[in-house]
Image (cartoon, helix red, strand yellow):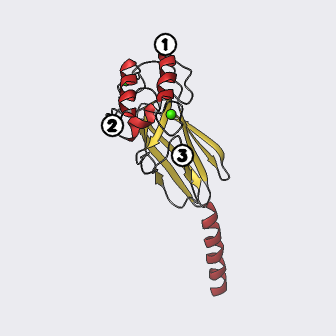
């Protein structure tokens, strides 16, 4: 009997490890703090292949029953080609950024780096100017981009658009801020921002 219990215990231990599952969830907000709907969130990797959810008016996403002990990638994207929130005033702010007289933090930088080169230069201004003159798009990247709430370009912390999850061991909460590229001052009033 003792041997049987030991065998069952070992069997359970192995299988419990194999079927352990977790939840990956979070919230996507706008720069003004509103909840951002219609963001496509993809979870890829491990044995699941790909799982996709779209945020609703609560701005939340949830992946249930994600197998533990595996590696994943979370990717966010959202369509957009409106100039809502993008104006010549943003060009002025970018000029000031280049001249070191205006910098309102990491999200300001992310919205200003139009070509995703890792710096804000006169080329970004020229590209955004063409977008404005052309009444919208195409953006080199985006226009929506998604930064984790710990994103900071000056310290290389946090992630944008893609978040790696290595060896999932527990339930994770990963929150994002949606940034509309070109809307440097974050004045966009997107209809999906609740
Ligand atoms: Ca750039
Ligand atoms: Ca703006």
Position of residue 150 measured from the top left corner of the image (x, y, whole percent): 41, 48
Front-most of residues 153 and 73: 153
Front-most of residues 145 and 15: 145
Q: Which mark is residue 133?
A: 1
Give SS at disc 1: helix
State whether residue 189 appears in this view.
no
Q: Residue at x 66, y 82 (%)?
A: 4
Quadrant location of residue 175?
Answer: top left
Q: Which residue is mark 2?
A: 104
Q: Which mark is residue 64?
A: none
Q: Residue at x 60, y 61 (%)?
A: 69
Q: Earlier in the sequence, mark 2 or mark 1?
A: 2
The crowding category of the residue bearing disc 2, from other C-alpha atoms within 10 Å (few below 14, some 14 to 19, many at least 20), is few
Judge whether 5 appears above or below 120 on screen: below
Front-most of residues 20 and 8: 20
- Position of 51 with respect to 120 (left or right) is right
Q: Earlier in the sequence, mark 1 or mark 3?
A: 3
State whether residue 7 appears in this view.
yes
Q: Disc 3 versus disc 2: distance between alpha carbons?
A: 33 Å
Q: Which residue is mark 3?
A: 63
Mark 2–mark 1 CB contact (< 8 Å): no
Quadrant location of residue 177?
Answer: top left
Give SS at disc 3: strand
Please identify the quadrant where the N terminus is shown.
bottom right
């Amino acid at each position: 009997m003792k041997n049987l219990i030991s065998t069952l215990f070992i069997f359970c231990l192995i299988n419990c490890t194999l079927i352990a599952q977790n939840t990956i969830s979070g919230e996507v907000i706008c720069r003004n703090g509103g909840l951002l709907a219609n963001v496509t969130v993809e979870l890829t990797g491990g044995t699941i292949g790909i799982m996709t959810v779209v945020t609703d008016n609560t701005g939340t996403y949830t992946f249930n029953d994600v197998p533990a002990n595996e590696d994943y990638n979370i990717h966010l994207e959202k369509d957009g080609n409106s100039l809502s929130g993008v104006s010549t005033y943003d060009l002025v702010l970018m000029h000031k950024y280049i001249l070191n007289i205006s910098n309102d933090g990491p999200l300001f930088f992310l919205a200003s780096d139009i070509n995703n080169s890792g710096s804000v230069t006169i080329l970004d201004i020229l590209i955004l100017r063409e977008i404005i003159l052309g009444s919208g798009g195409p953006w080199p990247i985006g226009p929506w981009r998604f930064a984790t709430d710990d994103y900071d370009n000056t310290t290389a912390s946090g992630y944008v658009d893609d978040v790696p999850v290595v060896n999932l061991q527990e339930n994770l909460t990963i929150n994002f801020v949606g940034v509309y590229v070109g809307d440097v001052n974050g004045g966009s009033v997107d209809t999906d921002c609740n």
